[in-house]
Amino acid sequence: MNTYERIDRDLSDRDFTVVGKSVKRSDTLEKVTGTARYAGDVALPGMLHAKMKRSNVAHARIRSIDTSKALALKGVKAVLTHQDVPRVLHAGSPHPRSASVTRDQYILDDRVRYWGEGVAAVAAVSEEIAERAVALIEVEYEPLPGLFTIEAASEPGAPPIHENGLDRNHVLPPVFVTRGDVDKGFAEADLILEREYDLGRPTPAYMEPNVCVSQWDGNGKLTMWTSTQSAFMVRGTLAEVLGVPLNKVRVVVDHMGGGFGAKQDLFQNEFLCALLARQTGRPVRMEFSRKETFLGGRSRHPGKIWLKQGFTKDGRIVAREARVTFNSGAYGSHGPGVTNVGTAALTSLYRCENVRLEGRCIYTNSPIAGAFRGYGVVQTYYALDLMMDEAAEKLGFDPAEFKLMNAVREGDIAPSGHPIVGHGLGDCIRRVMEETNWHELRRREKPESVKRRGIGIGCEMHGSSAYPGIKEQGNAIVKMNEDGTVTLITGTAGLGTGAHTALSQIVAEELGVPFEAVSVVQGDTDIVPWDIGAFASHTTYLGGRAAQLAAADVRRQVLEHAAPLLQAEPADLAIRDGFVVVTSGSNRSIRLSEAVGPKRGMPAMQLVGVGTYMPTKSYSFAAHFAEVEVDTETGEVAVLEVVPVHEIGRVIHPIAAAGQIEGGIQQGIGHTLSEDYVIDLTDGRSLNPSFVDYKMPLSMDMPSIRTIILETAPDPGGPYGAKGVGEDPIIAIGPAIANAIYDAIGVRFHHYPITPEQVLNALKSKANETRQ
Amino acid sequence: MNRLVSMTVNGEARELAVAPNRTLLDALRNEGSLTGTKKGCDVGDCGACTVIMDGRPVNACLVLAIEAEGATIETIEGLQPSYDQPHLLQQKFMEHGGAQCGFCTPGIIMMAKALLDENPDPSEDEIRFALAGNICRCTGYTKIIDAVRATAEELRKAGTL
Amino acid sequence: MKPFEYYEPASLAEASDLLRRLGKDASIIAGGTDLLVEMKEELRSVLHVVNIKKIPNLRNFTYDPAAGLRFGALVTVREVETSPHVIGNYPNLAKAVSLLGSVQVRNRATIVGNICRASPSADTIPPLIADGASLSVYDGGADRTILLEDFFTGPGRTVLSPGDIVTGISLPAPGPTSGRAYIKHGRRKAMELATVGVAVSIEHVAGQCSDVRIALGAVAPTVIRARRTEDLLRGRRIDAALLAEAAESAMQEATPIGNVRASAAYRRDMVGVLTRRAIGYAMGGAR
C-alpha cells in the first residue's frame, strides 16, 4: 500500500491539471506490449555478430596475439587487436564539462589491468562462430604483479597501474575539504567516536546486457544503436577517438533496459563494433553475455572510511574528521566524481561546523568501479548514519530524536556550497516517527527468542544535479502543431524512470493542454537537442525545467498569435483545457486549434519553443524506517518492512516517483545484506559473475514497502519546485537496516554487506564475551 | 545443418529453419522476428525470456527450438486481443507502474498470465512465489504485485476467467 | 552453444544403443535446464544430444498407499511439486522441489534429470534418499534397480555407464507414524543453490524414534546419509538434549568445502542447526 502525502504549504496554491497526477505513462505501452525497441532488438540486412576476447589474467603485458586460427575459421570476417585500432587515450566516462575527466583508456591496449578486460574482437556471420573464433585467439601474456586491494596498490613503492604522474596509484590528487576548526571541536567534545567502515562491491546488474549495433553509410556516417544513459557523450567520444566530426556520428537509444548510473561509460564494445563495421562494410552487432556484463561492467566503488566525530553531552556534533578511500578498479571512470561527491557529502546531513575530510581514489587490478546510483554518498552516509546511532546510544538519546536534533536545516551550507532550501530532512524524520509509532516500537519488549526483531532509522540527502562537479545543461524543443497538439523533442534519456512522461506532464501543464496531446521525440542525437545524459537524479529537475521553459516559449507565441483574434492583449490571455481564454473582463475564448491552425488562404504558423536550462543545485531528503528479523541460529537477516519518507519538492508523477523509491530500496537491501561482486584476491578472477551467485533480492525476499512522499521543500530551480528522487532511496535504506540489526541483537557492524555468517560469528563472540 | 521446425506461435502456424543448437529464445527473436521476448542472462536465472509453451511458462533460453516441434507458443506479442486494445494485464501494468525500464516486463507479464490462468485469485505470497524466477531490478516488485492483484480483481469482477 | 548432432530415438532400446555407440561425448536431454546451461558455459563438451522425450511410457505417475510413489524419467519437477499425493505423503520432497529454481525451470526440469546430474547440492536428492527412493535403470537388457543412496560416486558422477538410462524412480509408501521435513539454506528465499540442505524422514510414536533417515546436501562430494546421527536417534526419545547431540553429530559427519557461497565452517554450523530443526519439524513441531 502506498500513500502519497501532499503538504503544499510552501507552494503556491495553484491548481494543477496534469502535474502531480499519475497519468498512464506514455513510454510503457510499448514496454508492456513487447514492441519497445531496445538496442539489442535492432536487426539489419547483412548484419555480422561480434564478440570480444577477454583476458584471463588481471595484470599483464601482452607479448603477442595470434589471430591466424581465428581468421582461418569459416565465417569470420574481421579480427581486431590493439595493433589494429586507433591508439587514442580517452576517458571511460567522458563528461565533457567535468573538472575530473580521467583519460586513461585505449580501445585496446597492449596491457591488461583487470581480469576480463577486452584484448581483441571478432566479427563473424553468426554469434556462435564469433565465439568459436574468440576461443581460437591465442594471447601470450607477460604477467605483472596484481594489486587487488587499496592497501596493496597504495603502498609506498607500489608499481604504477597507470602512468599518470601521481604517486601510489592515486587516480586523482587527494581531495581535501575543511570547515571550521576541527581540533578545537574535538577539544570541546564529551564523547569521541572513531571507527573504520568497510564497504563492499555491489554492481548495478541492470537487466539489459550491454549491447550495440553499428552501421556506416555510403557517406562515411556511423549510426550506433546502443544502450546508454548519455548518448551525446557516446557520440562525442566515438567522434574523438575514431577521428570523425560530430555530424558523422549518430547515436540512437529508443529504450534502454536500466543503467542505474553505470551506463554513462563506454565499454570498449562501442568502438570495436564501429571499427568492425567500418572494416567489413557491414552492420555489426555486439552483445555481452550476462557474464561479460559483470566482467566488463561497472560496480560501485568499494572503500574504506575512517570516521572520527566529537559529540557533546547535550547532543551536538562538534567535530568531524574523515579519511575516505575508494577502490577505483583498473580505470578511473567516475573515480574523481565519486571521490569528490562522496567526501564532500560528509560536510552535511547532520550539522557540524568543524569538518576535516580527505578523499582518495586508488587504482587496483580489480573490476572497474564507475557511477552507480548513490555515487559515493551511499558509502559515506552509511558510515555517518551508523555512527550517529552509536553516539545516540552512548549519549542517552533516542536515535531518531538524535538525528532530528542534528538534521541539516534551512540555510545550512550544503556540500555543494549552496544554502539548503527548506527543512526536508526534519520533516522526513518526524513523519517516519509518526507513521511507525517509533517510540512505542522502541519500548516494545524484546523476548530472548531465536528470531529477534529490531527497528532502525537511516537518513540521507542527495543533490538533484551533478553541480558543481559538472556544469550541466538540458535542452528541449517544443512544437505546437496546427491542431493544438504538441511535440516535445528532448535529449533526456529514457532510463526507465518515467522521465518522458514527467516531461510531457510538465509541457502539458505549461501549455494548458491535456497530457495525451503531448508526444515525445527522443533518443536520436541527429534529431534531439544536446543533452548531458540521464544521471545525478536530474532528469526531471534539469530536462523537465528545460521542457517547461520551451513550453513557456511556445505559450508566449501562441498567446501573441491569438491576441488579435480575441481582441485582447497577450498578457490578458491564458491557455486552459485546450482553449485560449481571456482572463480579465471577458470570457471570450477560442479553441487552441483555431488560434494556431491554418486560416483561409494562409498556412499555419510553425510555433517552436526552445528551452535551455543550466541548473545549480537542490537537495532532496529521506528518512527510512526498517524492521528486521534476525535468526540468531543461522545469522540470516530478513527485512520485514520498510517505510521510506522522501521529501522531493513538487511530485510530478506520484506512482513513478514511488517506483523509483521502491526500486532503490530493493538495490539498497541488496548491497546491505547480500550483494557483493567478489574477486579472488590471489589472481583477480571474478568469483560470482552470474545472477545465481550475485545475490540480488528477488520477489520473495522483498518486504512490504509503505512509501510516503512529502512536498514540503520545493526548490525554485526545478519545474514547479520538483527535485530529484532517483538516487536518494538507495542511500537511506542501508543504515536503516544496519541500525535495525543492532536494535535486534546488540551487535554493531561497520561494513556491508552484512552476511549471515558474520552475524552468526558476531553473536558467538558476543556470547563468549558475556560468559567471560 | 538447419532443420525446419513447425510450431504455433501466437495462434499462427510458423515454420522456422534452425540449427539444433539454436534455443527457442534465439529462434523467436531472430528467425521469428519476435523481439519482445528478452535475453537477460541466457541461462534461466532471470525470467526475461519467459514464454508460455503448451500452456506452461518456460524460459525460452532453456528450450532447444527443435524441441518445440509441434508446440504452441505464446509470447508477449500475442497477448493483445486487438491492435488497439492491450490485454488487461498490460493495462494494469501501465496504470500501476509495473514497468520501469521494461526489459523484464514481457517475461513478467507472461509469467503473471500463466499464474492467473492457473490461479485466478492469487494471494500476495502466491504472486511473489510465482514471480521468484523473474528478476526485476527497477521496481522493488511492489508495483508489479499491485498490477497483478488489480488484474485478478478486475477479471473476477468481470467474471471472465 | 557449440553445434551438436541431435537424435530423437523412439524407444529405450534405440536410445540405449545410440548412447552406448556415441560414448562419453553424448548426453541425454530430458528437461535440458542443466544440460543447456552447462553446454552454453562450456562446462561440458557435448557433441551428441539424445532427446528421450519421444520415448513412450516415461511419463507415468502412480501413487498407491501400499506400494508408494512411482514416476517416470520425464515427469517434471513441477508435476511432482503440484501432485496432491506428493504434498500429502512426501512433504519433504514437496518442499524440496518447490525450492528448485523457478516455476519456469520446474516446468521443464525433470526429477530424474536433477538426480542424474549428481550435484551435491541438488534439492531433490536429500529427501529422496531420506525416503528410501530407488531408481530403475535400463541398460539394453533387463531393468535393474539401484538404491538412490548407492547411485552417486562423486560430484557429477554416478554408477551409470554409457547406454544406461534411468527410466523412473520409486519411493516406498510412508508408514502411519512417518514424519518428514526438508530445510534448504541459501541467501535468498528462491533461485538458490543450496548451501546446505537437510532432509529427515522419521518414524516416531509418542516422541520415541523407531527409525530415521537423515540426508545432508551440499556438505560432501555427494549427498550423504548421516548414519551415525541416525544411530544416535534410533530407539530413543527425542528431547532437546538429544536434538542438540544429533546436531553436533551431524556436523561431525559433514565434510563441507568453502566457496563464494559460504565457508566450510558456516556450512558445518548450518548442518547442526538445520538437522535439529528438521527433526523437530518432521516430528510435527512448529516452523
Image (spheres, rainbow, N blue to C red):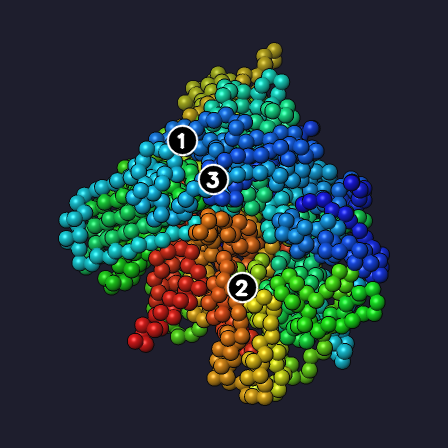
Tag 2–tag 3 contact (CB < 8 Å): no
Instruction: Tell me: residue C69, above or below residue A281.
Output: below
Q: Judge from the rendering whether residue B13 lies leftward or rightward of residue C212; answer left or right.
A: right
Which residue is identified by label 3? Answer: A142
Q: Secondary structure at mark 3?
A: strand
Q: Quadrant of residue A521?
A: top right
The local crowd at label 2, few if under 14, some if 14 to 19, many if 20 or more residues have their Cα within 10 Å, is: many
Residue type highlighted by circle 3: Glu
Residue that extends furthest to the top in the rendered view of this protein: A601
Q: Residue at x 67, y 37 (%)?
A: A129
Coordinates of residue A677 in the picture (x, y in percent) = 47, 50
Q: Quadrant of the C terminus of chain A?
A: bottom left
Residue type highlighted by circle 1: Arg
Sequence-wise, which precedes: disc 3 or disc 1? 1
Q: Nearer the viewer, mark 3 or mark 1?
A: 3
The local crowd at label 3, few if under 14, some if 14 to 19, many if 20 or more residues have their Cα within 10 Å, is: few
Which residue is identified by label 1? Answer: A103
Between the C-alphas of marks 2 and 3, the distance is 38 Å
Q: Which mark is residue C195?
A: 2
Tag 3–tag 1 contact (CB < 8 Å): no
Q: Secondary structure at mark 2?
A: loop
Instruction: Tell me: residue A601, above or below residue C40.
Output: above
Q: Chain of mark 1?
A: A
Between the C-alphas of marks 3 and 1, the distance is 24 Å
Residue type highlighted by circle 2: Thr
